[in-house]
Amino acid sequence: MSTRQLKQIDNKVLIIFTMDVELAREKGKKMSGPVSDKAGRRSVENYLTVIGKYGYTPTFFVHPELTEIQRDFFLNLRDKGAGLGLHLHPTKFTRKKCSVEMGGLSEKQQREILGLAVDMFEQNLGIKPQLFRPGAFSANDYTYKVLNELGFRGGSISIPGRIWAERFCIWSGAYPYPHLANSNMRQVPGNLPFVEIPLTVDFSRPLRLNHQGYHHYFDLRPGEKIYAGNTIIQKDFQLILENIAKQLVKNDPMLKTIVIDTHNDLEYLDRETESARHLHILLEHIDPVLKKYGLEPLDATMDKAIERFLEKDNEGE
Ligand SMILES: [Zn+2]
């Protein structure tokens, strides 16, 4: 059987549930984050409980200060099998606050600020972070090179298609499936030993402008408010999943993944809330929708997905 035929029968899709774990927001400031660190921790626990019921294991991207404030909590999650990576908003980093997100920083500035965050993570948890996601998916063409130099193995830096210039997040034309990052141009695969696993988006509808003033495709994050003019429209998770499944079958990437993101400022247990309702609808539809298109969902953390990608890459698929 040829490699090509082998590739065609690989119907497995790694389902990677992630969460960006933020510090509590500062009072009176318009920023993301839970109302308190305690509330943020409860949100993390509830997310773990809900997706765990469906057999999924999350990957948490944690803002570095929380590795000190909630050290044992995160070490315990890691012991239970959760993925643990670094999340950083230079605009929120208490060790060295910047006026812009990652993509607005020079190579030297990124090396310095990421180095400080890596040190903080490592000193508190005793492990060097190997996975990264920047706040607001903000990056520029230096970011992968710097991450590689600092010892990161991979992460989820990109959100294909999103254009949010104010946050230095421009991913027009970005390759949407797992790949080795490029040291010169962030949207294009390259040969850096850094495995990029992009957030999964639905390309079947045109890029849309949302009420916050940025362009994006639909993705699977729960609790997102979608407006048409002044009216909130319901996000149809079944339809988005169907579109994503069709894309996976059509494009047949070397490694099939579905990456879902959310935050620790949302409720996941109480189904009276939109975020909990969305998460449950999503979880209930993954199996039937993927099976309908001949695909098989598998639970994976980011670490597992990186390993699987490297195995396949070495097999020369
Ligand atoms: Zn964030």
Image (cartoon, rainbow, N blue to C red):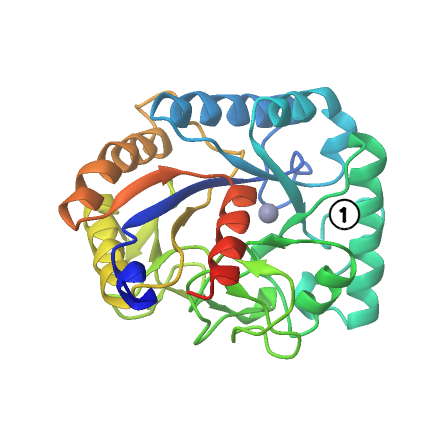
- When the figure is inspected, residue 82 is found, relative to residue 199, above or below; the finding is above
Residue 41, quarter of the rendered image? top right
Residue 234 visible in the picture: no
Which residue appears farthest toward the bottom when viewing the image?
184
Which residue appears farthest toward the left when viewing the image?
292
Quadrant position of the C terminus in the picture: bottom left
Tell me where residue 120 appears, x and y as whole percent.
83, 40
Which residue occupies the foreground of this view, 220 or 247? 247
Tell me where residue 289 appears, x and y as whole percent.
18, 43
- The residue at 33%/26% (across/down) is 54
Residue 181, quarter of the rendered image? bottom right
Tell me where residue 50 appears, x and y as whole percent.
39, 23
Classify residue 41 as left or right of residue 89: left
User: What kind of residue is marked 1?
Assistant: Phe
Which residue occupies the foreground of this view, 302 or 134? 302
- When the figure is inspected, residue 317 is found, relative to residue 258, above or below; the finding is below
Identify residue for label 1. Answer: 93
Marks counted in the figure total: 1
Quadrant position of the N terminus in the picture: bottom left
- The residue at 35%/29% (across/down) is 276
